[in-house]
Amino acid sequence: MNQTNEQVQVLPPRLELPGLEKNVFELRALKNFFLTGLVWGLAILASVPLISVIYMLIVEGGSRLDLEAVTALPPAGFETGGGFGNAILGTLTMVGIASALSIPIGIMAALYLSILNPNSKIATTSRFLAKVLTGFPSILAGVFVYAVIVITTGTYSAWAGGVALAVLMLPTVTLAAEEAMKQVPQKMKDAAFGMGCTRTQVIFKVVLPTALPGIMTGVILAVAGAAGESAPLLFTALFSNYYMSELAEPTASLSILIYNFSGMPFENQIELAWTASLVLVMLVLFFNIMARVVGRTKFRE
Amino acid sequence: MNMQSEMGEFIAKKYEPKGPVVLDCHVKNIYYGDFRAVRDTTIPIEKNKVTGFIGPSGCGKSTVLRSMNRMNDLIESFRFEGHIQYHNHDIYSKKVDAVIVRRYIGMVFQLPNPFSMSIYDNVAFGLRLNGFKGDEEEMVVKALKRAAIWNDVKDKLKNSGLSLSGGQQQRLCIARAIATEPDVLLMDEPCSALDPIATRQIEELMVELKQHYSVALVTHNMQQATRVADVTAFLGVDISNGGRTGYLVEMDDTKKIFEDPQQLLTKQYVRGEFS
């Protein structure tokens, strides 16, 4: 008798398990509902700025978006009509110069960082510096190029603007390309060496083709970033009201045009500033979408 | 009967090859940094035969195999003492270009490693690398047929090599390796990542391949050695001097190694007493 009594006391109190049916008004369900709503709301909030900016640009700038706007020269004072064709050309030219400079240098630097000598002093130092440079204030790139090129050549120019943008693109291209090349599996490189490839052949026949989508994604994102820059161009390319006739003269760009026109007291110029903003955003968006498409075309299963 | 080195270390009795030898491998020592990985191992690879390498893990069979086409040169701390004779050349002599060695002595790796290219381009890779001028397509088809994968891929040569199954990928890698008609084919546990059916196919393929090539096969699987290899080298691990150094214990015809081994260690290993 005694023994069974003791045993009963040792047993823990019976657990109160909750019912299996859903109860909407239970504390846990309410908490869940509230937190889910909060997360949803914040996610939407995060995309509000972009969506509202694009909405504003379409509403304000869409009405002037026509052939004249993208080909004509900027209007003076009280003129009506006009456009910013020279600024589009200038932006594309300078981004082109910047790409031509930064892409080869960046990819070759990435080759060194990822394959030739990844753990050397030079590699670790320049990798660190490249990371610092990605967060570099872009206006300082402008000041730097102003001192190095504008003062020495004596003129603002598309060259100087392109170099300033290249300084900003270089670390992005380098780090993205390094990452892409590092992801080429060792077994593929082994296979190439096993076939009797030289190191150069391994790089050109296996590493670069395999890493190409990743490299392209990084390059296009860097181009998109450079296209939207204004601060470095203020000190280097300045602005011009005419189509460029050579690369060694002050050159118009979309971002500087927006900056100039939006501060003017004329209705026409302000409208054009909106339209130019719309064109610039479309350009950047186009590059971003391209980057995503290219990034997805990996040669996989 | 057996020799001993000046340090009193066991040295296996020399295997007398019965046919012509393509690759005469004399390893004195192989080091990784200070670590002595392999010592005193002499393995002649005979023409048109499959030479199997068996032994417990860590005995250096893969190391010896990878030394035979200088793949180990890619490991920085690797150091080779000895000589490997290939057509009157020591492939480790200073005058020899490691890159060219690998074009004559092909390799198939443990994990299938096709390039992320189309099936056709994978096989054509070596031909293009060597500036092949003749009918590329004919060579690719021939290699795919010899590697017994033609029927699986003939309708999808443009698909990615990575879209195939593991066994098919490995046969593709074999096709890629033989497309350039190498003298010797080194196979480093080519079936260890494959299922039994794929393994069976690769084994049958190896027996076929020896008509055209000389094959050196590292395997962890003793049954595989009995099924495929004509000659078998058994490597052991020497832990006597505090290291873990692999060395050749015995080399002979496969039948002899498995049915009448001369060394006690070999007998214990082929009976499955340790692995």
Image (cartoon, coloured by chain):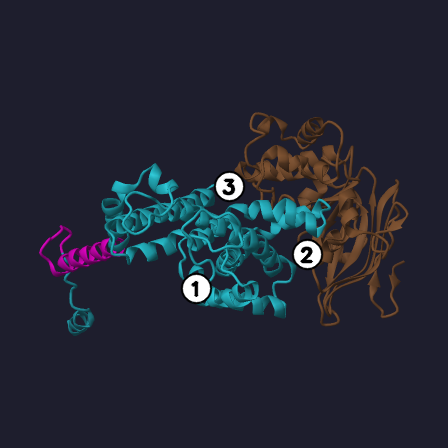
Chain colours: A cyan, B brown
Percent position of residue B172, x then y = 63, 36
Q: Is residue A222 left or right of residue B84?
A: left
- Identity, as a three-letter code, of the amino acid under mark 1: Ser
Percent position of residue A185, x then y = 57, 51
State whether discs 1 and 2 lie on one chain: no
Most foreground residue, B37 or B258 = B37
State whether discs 3 and 1 lie on one chain: yes
Residue B91: image tag = none
Residue that sits furthest to the left in the current view: A25
Residue A138: image tag = 1
Instruction: Choose the circle earlier in sequence order: 3 or 1.
Output: 1
Give the position of the C terminus of chain B as an image quadrant: bottom right
The residues bearing labels 3 and 1 have C-alpha atoms spaced at a distance of 37 Å
**Magenta span contains residue A42:** yes
Secondary structure under the numbered disc 2 in the rendered image: loop
Secondary structure under the numbered disc 1 in the rendered image: helix
Mark 1 residue crowding within 10 angstroms, few (<14) / some (14–19) / many (20+): many
Q: Which residue is mark 3?
A: A300
Magenta stretch: dominant secondary structure: helix
Residue B56: image tag = 2
Percent position of residue B236, x then y = 74, 58
Image-quadrant location for residue B175 = top right
Range covered by the magenta-colored residues: A19-47
